[in-house]
Amino acid sequence: MTVIEINDLRKSYQGRLAVDGVSLTVGRGEIFGLAGPNGAGKTSVVECVSGLRRPDGGTVRVLGLDPHGGDRRALQQRIGTQLQVAALPDGIKVGEALRMYASFYDEPADWRALMDEWGLTGRKGSRFAALSGGWKQRLFIALALVGDPEVVLLDELTTGLDPDARRTTWGLVRAMRDRGVTVVMVTHFMDEAEALCDRVAIIDAGRVTAEGTPRELIGRAGAASLEDAYFTLTGRDRA
Ligand SMILES: Nc1ncnc2c1ncn2[C@@H]1O[C@H](COP(=O)(O)OP(=O)(O)OP(=O)(O)O)[C@@H](O)[C@H]1O
């Protein structure tokens, strides 16, 4: 079953085209990766899917609903978003943030269990400003899950996490998928995309330049790994 359907999506900023006719479909329970160079338009695509940005052209449907239409509130209850640039008040404590976010949803997950799952219980009383980058990241991931979403959008999920936390995170993303949650994740780490994603789209200059399972992309590029395939498929040489 198709959960996300993006058709000919276009988005410009001050007359400059950032997303130039992207079409993608994501099925239920898939982990779908968006990769590509800085400024390619990945975040803009995710933000149009989440309802944060209004597309200039094309259509987006999530769970059959328009993120920018009258069903917006109903859809927000079913999507969890972890954004690249996110902020909380400096003084808010980890436990307070989770409890507050849970209150936004009609049927939230058990925020205490989530806090435990993400190793945050020992930091329940820590203030946001005092957390390291990696702990802030974990908190944002937990906040994305607190509404018990059917669709989760993760933008550079593991940036700033140490190798151990990265691997733990992969396990948790797989566990989400195994529960039937559909995951769209932007990543710059090709090892991560290869290990975790069922399908990957490479976006370059606002367009999808390649799409397939990691195995298909590796095969198409005649490469040994997805990282090697990335360089071949984007036409970029390794430094
Ligand atoms: N609010 C904005 N105002 C003006 N230009 C923007 C805005 N947001 C994004 N852009 C531009 O749109 C293009 C695509 O940006 P976007 O953040 O979607 O790319 P990205 O692939 O997610 O990049 P990165 O990998 O660096 O996060 C870039 O040229 C960026 O500078």
Image (tube, rainbow, N blue to C red):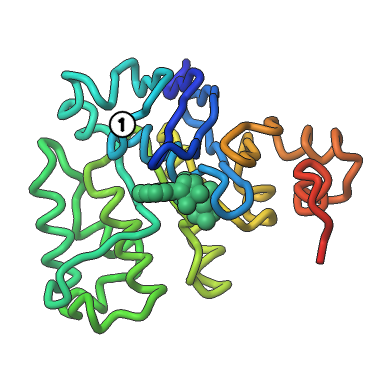
Q: Residue at 60% across / 47% down in the picture?
A: 196
Q: Residue at 15% across / 29% down in the picture?
A: 73
Can residue 170 be seen from the camera position used here? no
Q: Is residue 238 left or right of residue 189?
A: right
Count numbered badges in the picture.
1
Label 1 belongs to which residue? 54
Q: Residue at 63% across / 32% down in the picture?
A: 208
Q: For label 1, count other residues whose C-alpha is less than 10 Å away and answer few (under 14), some (14-19) or many (20+).
A: some
**Quadrant where the image shows the C terminus:** bottom right
Can residue 24 be seen from the camera position used here? yes
Q: Is residue 202 above or below residue 23?
A: below
Q: Indicate the position of residue 91 as horizontal and vertical percent values.
A: 12, 77
Q: Quadrant of residue 121?
A: bottom left
Q: Indicate the position of residue 8 as horizontal and vertical percent values.
A: 51, 20
Amino acid at circle 1: Arg
Q: Is residue 225 left or right of residue 51?
A: right
Q: Name the residue nearer the viewer: 146 or 137.
A: 137
Q: Is residue 121 left or right of residue 160?
A: left
Residue reaching furthest to the bottom: 130
Q: Is residue 69 above or below residue 45?
A: above
Residue reaching furthest to the front: 15
Q: Secondary structure at mark 1?
A: loop
Q: Is residue 116 above or below residue 45?
A: below
Residue reaching furthest to the right: 222
Q: Quadrant of residue 151?
A: top left
Q: Name the residue nearer the viewer: 224 or 150.
A: 224
Q: Indicate the position of residue 136 as horizontal and vertical percent values.
A: 33, 70
Q: Indicate the position of residue 130 as horizontal and vertical percent values.
A: 25, 84
